[in-house]
Image (spheres, rainbow, N blue to C red):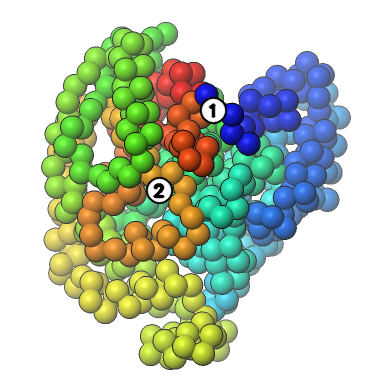
Amino acid sequence: MKDYNFTRPIDTDEFSDATSLLKNFKEGKTTSLDVVEKSLRSIADNHERLNAMTQLFAKEALEEAKKSTEKKQTKKIGKLEGIPISLKESIGVEGEEVTGGSIRMPVQIAKADALVVQRLKKEGAIIIARTNTPEFSFGHETRSPRFGVTNHPYLEDYIPGGSSGGESALIASGGSVIGIGTDVGGSIRYPAHCCGLVGFKPSGTAVSKKGVFPFVEREDWYLNDWLAVGPITHTVRDAKLVYEVIADKALDDNLVSNNLDNAELLISTDFDSEIRNETIKEVLIHAKQSLLNEGMTPRNLEINNIGKIHWNFGKMMIKAMKLGLKNWLRNDKDVGISVFVESLRRVIGEKTVSKEIYSVLLASKFLEPSDKDLEKLIQFYKQEKEELHKKIGRKGVLLLPTSGDIALKHNQTIQIDMSPLVPNIFSPMIFTNVMNLPSITIPAWKHRDRKTGLPTSVMLCCLPNSESLLFEAASKLEKVLN
C-alpha cells in the first residue's frame, strides 16, 4: 500500500473502539476517566481546525467518568459504561438548545432528553459533545448559518460529509468514541464513507425519533419511514453494540449461525448509479468475491425504476421540507420568510438561510408536487418497496456502493444535491432510505483513492428484522477491507 501521510485511527495506539475499551476497563488497563480526558484533549486540539463540535459537556463528562471509574463490579455495569459519545445537534438534550443550525428559527429548548439519549445514558454512556449539522440537516456538506463549516479530519479542503458531518469529523479525530446521527438520504453513511468510519442506518421505525429534530408528528407520513437514527463508529461490532442499546426491539439472531452459508449475496447488475472513482469499482469487486468466499450464494437482483425513484425522492423531499420550513423559518416576531426578500438580502450579503435551503425554496416554486400528485407518489413508493422486499427475502444481503466518489471538496455537493439529473453519486444511499432498507457502510482503508489517500467504502443492505445477518456479513467484510 502507498505510504500516505495519515492512517486509520483505529490502527494506531491512540484510538480504540468501544468494545476494546470496555474490555480494558474491566481488566483495569485503562479507565473511563483516562478516555474522557483524552477525548477532551483531542477536541481542544482540533476544534479550531475542524469546527466539528457545537457544544461541549466537559465538566459533566468528567464527573460522569469519575463515577464510572469508581463503580464497583458489584453494581450494575451498563453495556456502554464509561464510553464518551457525541450527538448530532438535532438530537435533544434536556435543557439544551435545538437550533437546526438556523439563525432564523427561534431556538427550542429540549424539555427532556431524546429517547435515544435516555437509552444511551441508561447503559452508562457519557455524552461529551454535540456536533455540527447543515441547516435543518439538509445537505451532504456540513455547513450552517449558525455554526459555520466543518472540515474533513485529514484533508481540510475536503468535506467530512453531511448531514452528520460534525459527528464523523469528531470521531475520526478522537473527540468521541461513538456518535449518533440521523439519516434521510445518506446523512449517517455518507459522513462515515468520507472519513473512513462505519455508519449504520436502521430502518426508519427501528429507533425512536422522539425528541429528535425534525420532529415527525405523523406515523403514516412517508418521512417517518425514510428518516432514521443510528450510530457512526470505528467498527462494525461497535455499531451492533450501540444499535442493541438504542433499538426499540432486540435483534433476531435466528438467521445467523457461525457462517454465512445460508445467506444470499444480492448483486444488482442494472443499478443505475454514477461511479466517478475507479477505486470504488475495485472495492466492490473485492467485496463481492470476499463474501462469496465466506459461503454466501450469489443471486442477481433486478432493480427497476431507480431513476424514477431518485427523481421523485427529490420532489417529495421538497414537499416535506416546504411544509417544515413554513414553521421553522418564522423568526422571533412570527414573520415567515419571503423568497423575494431573501433574494434581495443575498445580493447585499445579508442572507438568513443556507444556500441549500434557499435552493429548496426556489425549487419548490417549480417542483413541489400537489397534494393529489403526492398521494400518487406515495402509492408508487409503497408498491416499489413491497415488490423489492419480496425480491430480497429474509436471507438476502444487497451489495451497493455507498457513494460514487470519495469525499468531495467544499462547495461541490450542492451542485449534485439540487441537480435534476439522475443518476448521481448519492443514489444508492437515497434508494435504501426510500425503500426502508437497514444499511451499513464499511470503510475500505485497503482501497484508498490513489491521489488523495482518502478511504473508500461499500454498503450492505437487508430487510428490516434481518439486521443480525447484515452485521454478520459486515463484520466478515470489514476484516478483508481493513
Mark nearer the N terminus (2 vs 1): 1
The spot of residue 402 in percent (x, y) is 37, 40
Vertical order, 309 against 358 (above or below)? above
- Residue 167, can we see it? no
Vertical order, 428 against 18 (above or below)? below
Q: Residue at x 32, y 44 (%)?
A: 276
Q: Amino acid at mark 1?
A: Lys
Residue 311: quarter of image:
bottom left
- Residue 297, can we see it? yes
Residue 393 lies left or right of residue 156; in this view the side is: left
Secondary structure of the residue carrying tag 2 is loop
> Callout 1: 10 Å neighbours few (<14), some, many (20+)?
few
- The residue singled out by tag 2 in the image is 186
Task: For marks 2 and 1, give the CA distance.
Answer: 29 Å
- The residue singled out by tag 1 in the image is 2
The spot of residue 356 in percent (x, y) is 42, 69
Residue 144 lies left or right of residue 302; in this view the side is: right
Q: Residue at x 47, y 63 (%)?
A: 411
The spot of residue 16 in percent (x, y) is 68, 27
Vertical order, 241 against 432 (above or below)? above
Q: Nearer the viewer, mark 2 or mark 1?
A: 1
Relative to the observer, which residue lies in front, 3 or 153? 3
